[in-house]
Amino acid sequence: MGLSGGGSGAGHRIVGLAGLLATVLFIALFRLERLGPLDFWAWLALNIVILVVLGFAFDRGYGRRLKEDLGTGLVRKLAIGIASAAALYAVFAVGRLVALRILPFAASGISSVYALKAGVPALRVVLLIGLVIGPGEELFWRGFFQERAAATTNPAFGFALAALLYTAVHLASGNVMLVLSAAVCGVFWGWLYFRFRSPVLNVVSHTLWDLAVFVFFPF
C-alpha cells in the first residue's frame, strides 16, 4: 500500500485537526468518564465511531487501502496479529509484577482501570471492544492518523507522533499506570503498523489484547 496524500499544507491541516479532535474527545472522556446516559464504555465507543467516520470522510483513499489490505496475505496477517497480541500480553504480565514491586501506586492504578467496568455486563464490554473499540482505535490511530502523518512528513515521524499523542490523551485520566500502559501500547502497535503497514493486522492484535486484558484474562 502506498502512502495516501502528499506533503501539502492541506495534508498537515488534516493531521492537525484530527489530532486536535481526538485530544478534545479523549480528554473529556478520561476527565469525566460519563456523558449523560453514556457510561465510560459507551462514550469511548462513540468517540471512536466519530473519529473513524471522519477519517473516512477526510481520506478518500482509506477504504481502498483497507480493501487492498484484506485482499493480500490475510492468513499471515491474522497469525502475526494473534502472536503479537500474545506477546504484548506477556510483556504486561511481567511489567505488572515489576511495577507492583517498585511502584507504590501501581496496585491502586491498576484497580482504578478495572473499576471502569464495575457493574457493566461482561457481554456488553465484549461486544463494544470486539466490534467497535478494538478495531476502531486501530483504524483511527494507526490506519488513519499515523498513515496521514507519515504521508505528510515521513514514516518515522508518523510513528512517533501517533505514539506520542496516543499516550498524551491518557494523561487526562490522572492514572500513571494507565498512561504507562498507553505508552507501551502506542509504541508497540505503532511499530507494528510502521513495520507491516496493515490496519487488519493491527486490528486483530489490538482487539484480542483488549479482550484478554479486560475480559478473559484480566490481571
Image: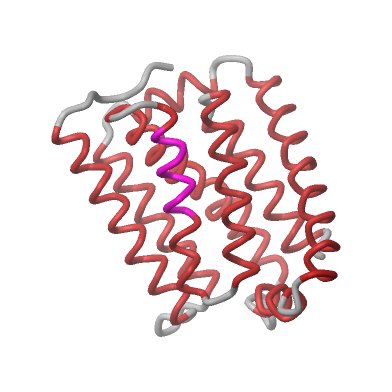
Q: Residue at x 36, y 30 (%)?
A: 150
| Residue 72 vertical placement versus 28 (above, below) | above
Image quarter where the N terminus lies is top left
| Residue 5 vertical placement versus 143 (above, below) | above
Image quarter where the C terminus lies is bottom right
Q: Quadrant of residue 123?
A: bottom right
- The image shows residue 94 at horizontal and vertical percentages of 84, 54
> Please, which residue is most extreme toward the left here?
9
- The image shows residue 118 at horizontal and vertical percentages of 69, 81
Q: Residue at x 44, y 30 (%)?
A: 156
- The rendered magenta stretch, by its main secondary structure, is classed as helix
Q: Nearer the viewer, residue 95 or 131?
A: 95
Look at the image and say whether residue 167 sits in the magenta stretch: no
In the image, 158: left or right of 167?
left
In the image, 37: left or right of 92?
left
Q: Residue at x 51, y 22 (%)?
A: 69
- The image shows residue 97 at horizontal and vertical percentages of 85, 63
Q: Residue at x 32, y 52 (%)?
A: 19
| Residue 18 vertical placement versus 200 (above, below) | below
Q: Which residues are magenta?
A: 157-166
Q: Nearer the viewer, residue 79 or 109?
A: 109
> Please, which residue is most extreme toward the front here?
102
Q: How many numbered marks, from 0 up? A: 0
| Residue 51 vertical placement versus 35 (above, below) | above
Q: Nearer the viewer, residue 89 or 82?
A: 89
Look at the image and say whether residue 160 sits in the magenta stretch: yes
- The image shows residue 80 at horizontal and vertical percentages of 71, 28
In the image, 69: left or right of 103?
left
Q: Quadrant of residue 100?
A: bottom right
